[in-house]
Structures are given as structure tokens and as C-alpha cells.
Amino acid sequence: MNMTVQTSSVDTAPPLWQMRLKLALKNFKSGWAIFKENPIGIIGLVLIVFFALLAALHPILMATAWEPAVYDPITGYDFEILIHPSPPTWIPQPDNPMWEFSFRHVLGTDPLGRDVLSQLMFSTRSEFLLGVGAALVTVLIATTIGAVAAYYGGLVDMIFMRIADVVYMLPFIALLIVLSSLFDFELIHLALVYGVLAGFGGTTIVIKSQALTIKVKAYIEAARIAGGNDLHIIFTHLVPNLLPLSFLYMMFTVTGAIFSEAVLSFFGLLDIRMSWGLMIQTAQAAGYLLNSWKYWYLMFPSGVAITLLCAAFYLVGRALDEVVNPRLRKR
Amino acid sequence: MGKYILKRVGQILVTLLIFQTLLFVILTALPGDVTNRMLTNPDIPPEVRERTRQALGLDDPVLIQYGRWLGNFLTGNLGVSYSEYPKPVIDILLERIPRTVVLFLTASIVQFVVGFTTGRALAWRRGGFFEYGSTVVGVTLYTVFTPWFGLMMIFIFGARLRWLPLGKFLDPVIWRNAEITGLADSASKGNYVFTRMLLTASIAVVLWLLLTIFTRNMSTRRRNRARLGGTFLILATAVGIWAASEIGYLAWDIVKHMILPVVTITLVGFAGTMLLTRQTMLETLREDYIQTARAKGLPEKVVRDKHAARNAMLPVFTGLIINLPGAISGGIITETIFSWPGMGITLLNATTSEDIPLVMGTLSFIGLLTLTAHLVADVTYAFLDPRIRY
């Protein structure tokens, strides 16, 4: 008799995953309502969506409208234009009798005759992959270590916090410069190294201090009394509550990773086919810097793109900060 | 206080040891060793390579090599540079460290003062176009791609307006004809003048600190007058001595080369300080003691500068400490863009020419610089915040 009552109650209640999904949806909705109020976050989000569209559009354009021999970001060359770099084709050129209005090269061509817009769009995808990859590595490491260090305390905590102190004081860019020149660095290696360095460094300290405030909550105690073992408590009770904060720090990691990639490829130290930093380096090494006014399309688009994408993730991070930290909200 | 400083020094030393270990690991993880270069030359017999390996101790166990590495670092023996061959690495570094430190210190101080002042003003005058505009400009400058920004600064102020030189440390045309007794090449002339400039600056800073300490117990009006007059006197004397001396125009040349990098680092860095100051000021302004100060009838300026700003300064200073590694990275990038012959460009040139002793030496000293800056910032923080006494 007792048995039947229990089964019937289980039958009527919705399954656990459905309830969790509902809760998550509710949390997301309330978070979105706060996020929406802040124009800063919306600007950042719009920028990110814009760049994501750019990245997604490139393969489509290459397959349909753009001739690969002309528009390939690395090997393309436009034979129909006599002098490279050539300015955007939609801007009137009074001194050029050959000029006619078209959208053939929206941002002109670089000194090697390649389409600047195509390069810009091609690089966007790798920037996203790098940023998100590094951020995922960071969040994985930082959340796990933060939760474990806060939960166990003592020696484990001390070891990881000392490591964090050391890593976060490292001169990042200098170290990356040396590593990338001594070893063959590709994008994936950079994402891993940056992710590991950022994950063991400052992010861990922040996440651990958050984990400490969760660790003393009553439901952790309840879970322990109910017989949950350490791993179960850490991964089903501690980590899910740290995820909003981790997500916030993911945004800042993306900014840092994209910035470092741009710096390294600007110095010509990365084994990479095309990137925004490399575009600036090509223009500077070929001597177009002192004539930037005339050849604005060589350095301006890529420089602005790096700045805007970094700013976008930073702005979203700032707005998420208000969602995660109720203390910062307007009263 | 003393105990706290000692504890911090101990922690910094441990960090330095770990950093050195990391460098050693990178060095040993490199495939091959120095003598690999001998393989490319058919005239060098294999025995010579073997002998070199033994002489350098490359066949010894890793732990012994590690001990030797640490010992050499402590005694300042960093080997000989490949790219500037018979010159020891330590000599190259000792010449370039002051240049980096001067650039970094000047930029940090200017950046902090500008960021703090603007942030304070922003928090005081809330709302409207002023606030939004400065936030947008601030965030843009904070996330701007530093190399590109530096190049644009060179283009605008160096190439278009021609106000300032394009880069480098000094103008060789002026220095070639400069007469300094006993010195032939312009590099040593540059060092001669630069050392004296550093000396002047250090003396001026010490005098200014003495002035601040001696005027501490005066009444407000007298103190302000004495500090203003004293600062002016020190500056006027320093500038006067240099203007009167025959190497004054050479010093002015170095200063002229310094302006653009300092302005660039300041512009990139000050936005972070500004936004942080604004935020902490807004939080401080809600406190009860601000209301009390206003109720007492104190002038608004006193409430802002003495009651609010001083308390808002602590978190801003913490932010400054947290951003130190970033600031040093920014300095490295800026130096490279402006060809300022400091640590940053030395590191980059050494890495591209595979001058491994110089790379390792430079990286060690950049680490040392970061850690020292951290220590100084921590100690200053302990002075600023009376609650830190552990």
C-alpha cells in the first residue's frame, strides 16, 4: 500500500529535468530583464551579433558571389585592377579615368591585391573560435579549481591560491611573445596557453571567493546530511551556482585572448594564415603607415574591428556584472 | 607594518623563484641546445661540439643545471648575447632598464592623476551627455588595440602635424655634433645625459617628499601656499640648471622623444582608473559621513576632495595594483611601436633573432620589474590604508 502511494506521487509530479529546465528558463528571463535595462550591454550584444554575422557570411559569399581566385583572403589577386593597393570601388576617384561605381571591393585591396573585406570577414571567424576556446578552457579550469579549493580548504586551497598569485603576476604578453617565438604557435595553442594562464590566475581567485559564500549555505549542509559525497556536492550543488559568475569572467577572457592574438600576430610571431593583427602588420611593414590618410582602408578597418570586438565583449561583461552582482544595480 | 612588508618581500621572493623555474622549464623544453648551430657548419668537427657541450655543462643532470641557472641569475651572470656578440647580457639590460622604468613610472603617475581627477569630476556631475560621452570614450580607449592606436598617434602627431619625432630615443643628427668631452659615439653620450636627467629627477622627487612632510602640520592656507611655492621652486631650479648647462638641448631632445609614448600609455590606461574612480566615488557619496559633512556646512569642494575622494581612493589603488601586469604589457607594446630602446623592444628583437640568452635575461628582468612594482604598490597601499596592519 505504501509503495503504491509513492509511485503515484512520482507519476503526477513532472520529471526532474523538466522542473530544472523551467527553473533555468525563469532565471534566464529575470536575468534578461535586468540585462535589457542597461544600454551598455545591448550595444555590446548588437556588436557581437554583427561580427558573428560577418563571420557566418564569409563562407556563403565565397561559395556564391565571390570568385575564389579573386576574393580568397590569402591567395586572391584581382587582375582587373592595375595598381594595388586600390581604394574602395564605390568611392569616386576623380584622378582615375577607369573608375566606375561598383561594389567589387567594398573596402579596397591590400598591397598584394587581396580583398580587404574578405580578409576582415575571414579573420572574424578565427577570432571568435580563439576567444570562445580560450574562455571555455579558462572557465573549466577556474570553476573546477575554485569550487574544489573552496570546498576542501586547507592545503589544497593554499597550493592553488599560491599558484594563482604567481600566475596572475606574470607578465602575460612578454611570456606569450617568448613562447610563440621559441615554439611553433598556432591558434589552438594560443587558445590553450592563454586559457590555462587565465584559468589558473586571477579568475580562480574571484570564483573561489564566490564559492566560499555558497559553501556555507544551508542546502550544502543538507546535501551532506542526506549522504551526498564530496564530488556530488561540488558538481551538482556548488558548480551550478558558480556558473553565472564564470560566464561573466568568460566575457573578460574573450577580450584578453583576442587582444593577445592581435598583438602576437601584429608582431608576426603567430603561425596563422590571416588575422586582423596581421593585416595591420602587412600594411605597416610595407610602409603605408605615414600615408594612412590616403590608404585608410589598409589599417583602419582591422584596427577598428579589434577594438570594437574587444569592447563588445567587455561591455557585455560589464552589463552581466549587474545581473550577477545585485549590489551594483540601480536602486 | 614592518612585519607586513617582510611578509610581502618573502612572498615576492618565492614568486620570483617560481618564475625563474618556469623560465628554466621553457628553456629546457626547447628542442636541441645552443651547440645545434654548430651542426650547420661543416668546418666544425663533432669533437668541438662535444667539448663545447662539456664546457657549458649541457650534459650534466637537469637538477645541477637548474642550480647553476639560479646561481647565475643571482650573481647577474646571464651569459653573452648572440646578436650583439661580445657584449654580456647584463650590460645590455643595465643600459635599457632605466629607460623602461622611467617611461613606465612617468606614464603610471600621469595616468593615475588624470584618471582619478576626471573620475572624481564625473561622479560629482552626474547624468546627461557628459557622463555618457566620457563612458563611451573611456571604454573605447580601455579596449583599443594598443599597437594600432600607437601607430595612429605616430601618424597624426609625428607624420601629419610634425610636432613630435616619430620614435626612437634620440635624434642622431643632433647628437652626432654634440660635444661631450671624452665620449665619442652618440649611444654613450645618450647614456651620459640620461643618467644625469635621472639624477635630477630623483633629487627633485626627494626634495618634494621632504617638502610634503615638513608642511604637514601647518594650517590649511599656509600649507597650500608653501606646497605650491615649493613645488614651483623645485621645478624652476631643475629646469633652470638644465637650461643653463650646455647639454640642455640634448636633454630636451630626449624629453621630446618621450612625450608621445607617455601620452599613448596614459590615454590607453587612464580610462580604467577613471571608470573605477567614478564607481567608487558614487558608492562613497551615499555614505552617512558625506551627509554629515554637508550638514556641517562645509564647502562642496572640501566634501568632494577631503571626505569623498580620499575614501574612494583605496579601491582605485587596489585596481591599479591588479592592473600592474597589464600596464607592463602595455608598456612593452608601446615601447616596440615607438622604437623606444627599453626592455620591450629588446625582448622582441631578441626573440626574432633567436638570441636566447638575451631573451631569457630580458624576461627575467621584466618579471623582476613586475614583482618589484607589485611590492612597491603593496607597501604604498599599506601606508594609505591604516586598517592593514598584520
Image (cartoon, coloured by chain):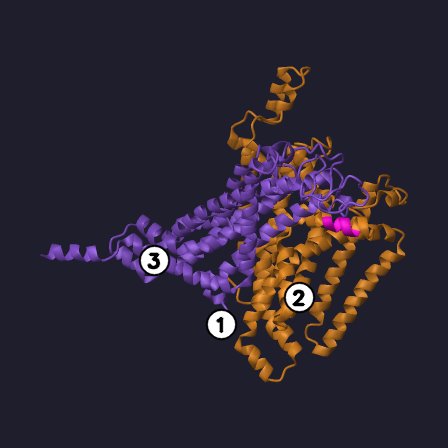
Chain colours: A purple, B orange
Three-letter code, disc 3: Lys
For label 2, the residue is B118
- Could you tell me what secondary structure mostly forms the magenta stretch? helix
Question: Can you identify the residue that label 3 sits on?
Answer: A22
Q: Is residue B30 above or below residue A22?
A: above
The number of numbered discs placed on residues in the rendered structure image is 3
Residue A178 percent location from the top left of the image: 61, 38
Instruction: Calculate the distance from the C-alpha at mark 2 to the C-alpha at mark 3.
Output: 46 Å
Q: Please determine if labels 1 and 3 lie on a single subunit.
A: yes
Q: Which residues are magenta?
A: B152-157
Within-10-Å neighbours for mark 2: few <14, some 14–19, many 20+: some
Dots 1 and 2: beta carbons under 8 Å? Answer: no
Residue ID for mark 1? A331
The residue closer to the viewer here, A227 or B380, is: A227
**Secondary element type, mark 1:** loop
Q: Is residue B283 left or right of residue A18?
A: right
Of discs 1 and 2, which sits in the foreground?
1
Q: Earlier in the sequence, mark 1 or mark 3?
A: 3
Chain hosting mark 1? A
- The secondary element bearing badge 2 is classed as helix
Residue A271 counted in the magenta span:
no
Q: Is residue B254 visible?
A: no
Q: Nearer the viewer, residue B379 or B286?
A: B286
Give the distance between the C-alpha atoms of the residues marked 1 and 3, in whole angstroms: 28 Å
The subunit carrying tag 2 is B
Q: Secondary structure at mark 3?
A: helix
Identify the residue at horizontal 59%, vertical 63% (top origin). Answer: B276
> Which mark is nearer the camera, 2 or 3?
3
